[in-house]
Structure formats: structure tokens, C-alpha cells
Image (tube, coloured by chain):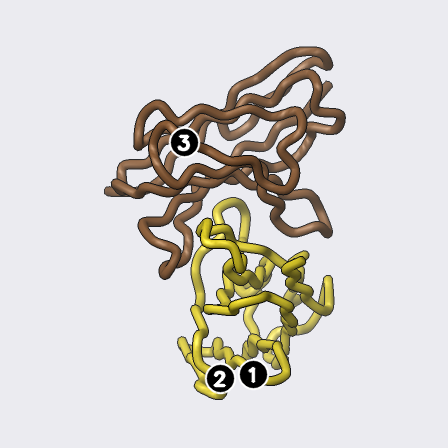
Chain colours: A yellow, B brown
Amino acid sequence: EDKVVQSPLSLVVHEGDTVTLNCSYEVTNFRSLLWYKQEKKAPTFLFMLTSSGIEKKSGRLSSILDKKELFSILNITATQTGDSAIYLCASWSSSNTGKLIFGQGTTLQVKP
Amino acid sequence: DGGITQSPKYLFRKEGQNVTLSCEQNLNHDAMYWYRQDPGQGLRLIYYSQIVNDFQKGDIAEGYSVSREKKESFPLTVTSAQKNPTAFYLCASTPDPAFGYTFGSGTRLTVV
């Protein structure tokens, strides 16, 4: 059965800290891994990773995929209170249905 | 602007009542999805539809029903058979499994 697992489930840091969020996956016929940020309601897309070892970067956020070890990390440097959110990791199901399988999410709280 | 609209944002239901959550998109996406979000459990798939007039059960379909009579609309009915319906419900769509989802802003359902 396809599975995505995130850790930690929650994290509290102070502004300026660097955080690393983890996502491991077990998906047959893996195609890509996605990261979303959910602040209040609708998750918003951050990154899609398909190739191993290539870092995707957007401002203070970056992510990398390791297809051999079946995991991805999301790094946030110089955190700000606006980074407080739930971060979701997901992978496409091995069935050809367009279903995304989500991890439990990591709740990040950044204190001033 | 194109997007997904979910309504209502908040919904209260008495036990034993059916209730319908609306999801409308003007993105011309073929595939639409309903997820349920509970604290600490990430997003779980309820139903999905890859094309109009067709839909399939997801991982937690019991107590829910859907219809897909129009491409732009995918309403979800939470029936009285759903044992624990209090949750945050998210609707999503995608034009192709190669892309990530676009999410609606969600409906928070509370059973009183």
C-alpha cells in the first residue's frame, strides 16, 4: 500500500532559526513528490520534485529529493512568523487515477 | 479569475441530517477530488472523479456520496451514516496527474 510519512508532526522555533522538515515515501511506480503550505484554509503549492539530487529553491525555502533512500526534505532558513503553517508532503498514487497520497503534515509554529 | 469555490465556509449540522457541500471550478479541469482533513491525520481521500458522469470511491467513502453531472461541479453529501463527520473538507482539481492540485478554501463542518 502506498504511504507517505512526515516528521516531526509539530515543531516550535524562534524567528531566524533554520528548520528541516522530513518526508519519506513508499510508492510503487513513483513519479513525483509535492510540498504544500497550508496557513488557514487552502493548501498552496510549493514544489514538485521528480529527479533525485536536484534542489528546488524559492527564496528561503528549498527542497531536495533522494529517490534511492525514498525521502525528501524541506528547508526553511531565517524563519519568520509568516512561515507558521502546516506543511504537507504528497506523492501520486501508483494507480493511474491522479490521486495524491498525503502525509500527516508538519505543523510549524514560528515565535517572534 | 479562475479557481475553485467551496461553499459554505462553515456549516453546522444536527445529528441525523444529511448535508451537501458545494465545490465549483472554472478552470476547465477534468479531475476533481474531495479530501477530509482531521488534526494529525493529514488529508484523506473521500471520492474522486476523473471525468464528468463518472466517479470512484476513495479511502474513506463510507457515509458520503457525490455526483458529477457537470464538469465544473462536484458536490459532496455527508449522510447521516457518517459516524464522525466533524472535520475540514477540501475540494481539489487538476487538469492532468502530471500537475499538482488546485485546492478550494475548504468547508468546516461541525455536527452539533
Q: Is residue A68 left or right of residue B69?
A: right
Of residues A97 and B111, which is closer to you in this image? A97
CA–CA distance in space, label 3 to label 2: 36 Å
Q: Is residue B7 left or right of residue B15?
A: left
Helix, strand or loop for disc 3: strand
How busy is the neighbourhood of tag 2: few (under 14 within 10 Å), some, or many (20 plus)?
Answer: some
Q: What residue is disc 2 on?
A: A52
Helix, strand or loop for disc 2: loop
Residue B40 visible in rendering: yes
Helix, strand or loop for disc 1: strand
Residue A65 in picture, x, y percent from top left: 53, 80
Q: What residue is disc 1 on?
A: A66
Work out whether disc 2 and disc 1 sit on a shared chain.
Answer: yes
Residue B105 visible in rendering: no
Residue drawn 63% across and 78% down? A20
Q: Which image quadrant is residue A45 in?
A: bottom left
Q: Amino acid at mark 2?
A: Ser
Q: What residue is disc 3 on?
A: B54
Work out whether disc 3 and disc 1 sit on a shared chain.
Answer: no
CB atoms of marks 3 and 1 within 8 Å: no
Q: Is residue B31 left or right of residue B19?
A: left
Residue drawn 50% across and 25% down? B66
Query: What chain does mark 2 sit on?
Result: A
Residue A106 in picture, x, y percent from top left: 66, 62
Mark nearest the camera among 3 and 1 is 3
Q: Is residue A80 left or right of residue B6?
A: right
In the rendered image, the vertical position of residue B78 relative to residue A83, given as above or below: above
In the rendered image, the vertical position of residue B1 relative to residue A83, given as above or below: above
CB atoms of marks 3 and 2 within 8 Å: no
Residue A13 in picture, x, y percent from top left: 69, 72
In the rendered image, the vertical position of residue A17 relative to residue B2, given as above or below: below
Residue A53 in picture, x, y percent from top left: 49, 88
